[in-house]
Amino acid sequence: MKELIQRIFRAIFLALLAMLGLIMAFVFTISTVIAILILSIVSAIRGKPFAAKEYWSNRQERNKSLLNKGPLSRGGNADITDVEVRDIPGDSRKTR
């Protein structure tokens, strides 16, 4: 009898946890829809069409300029194919 009550409580807890997850997903979906509506209203007021593809491409272009600066930038030469392989002296992982 005690085991049956524990199983029932576990099932109820799992169901409540699942409902909480569904509520959180619903809130996230509604907030995303509201954000897209706000973006489309603002773009309509400005007179520019709102397109998600255009938004992300503009954002990507802004971030590219930040990534191409600094000591780790490739300098525009993305087709690097030269690879150098060296043996490490004393490496115990050599195949025999």
Image (spheres, rainbow, N blue to C red):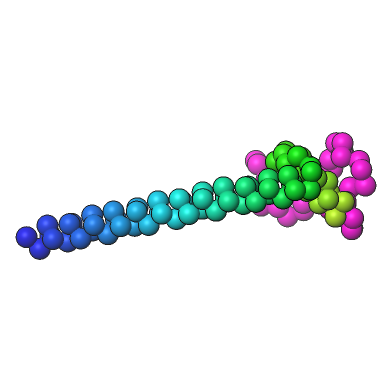
Quarter occupied by residue 23: bottom left
* Left or right placement of residue 70 versus residue 15 in this view: right
- Outermost residue toward the front? 45
Quarter of the image for the C terminus: give it: top right
* Left or right placement of residue 44 versus residue 23 in this view: right
Quarter occupied by residue 51: top right
Q: Is residue 87 visible?
A: no
- Whether residue 80 is in magenta: the answer is yes
Residue 27 appears at what percent x and percent y?
Answer: 48, 54
Quarter of the image for the N terminus: give it: bottom left
- Outermost residue toward the left? 1
Residue 62 appears at what percent x and percent y?
Answer: 83, 50
Residue under the image location 81 percent in, 51 percent down? 63
Report the predominant secondary structure element of the magenta stretch: loop
Q: In this view of the protein, which residue sits in the foreground, 73 or 64?
A: 64
Give the magenta part as a residue range: 67-96
* Left or right placement of residue 60 versus residue 29 in this view: right
Q: In this view of the protein, which residue sits in the foreground, 9 or 77?
A: 9
Residue under the image location 12 percent in, 57 percent down? 4
- Above or below for 54 versus 12: above
Residue 8 appears at what percent x and percent y?
Answer: 17, 57
Q: Is residue 7 visible?
A: yes
- Above or below for 29 versus 54: below
Residue under the image location 20 percent in, 60 percent down? 9
* Left or right placement of residue 20 versus residue 74 in this view: left
- Whether residue 83 is in magenta: the answer is yes
Residue under the image location 30 percent in, 57 percent down? 16
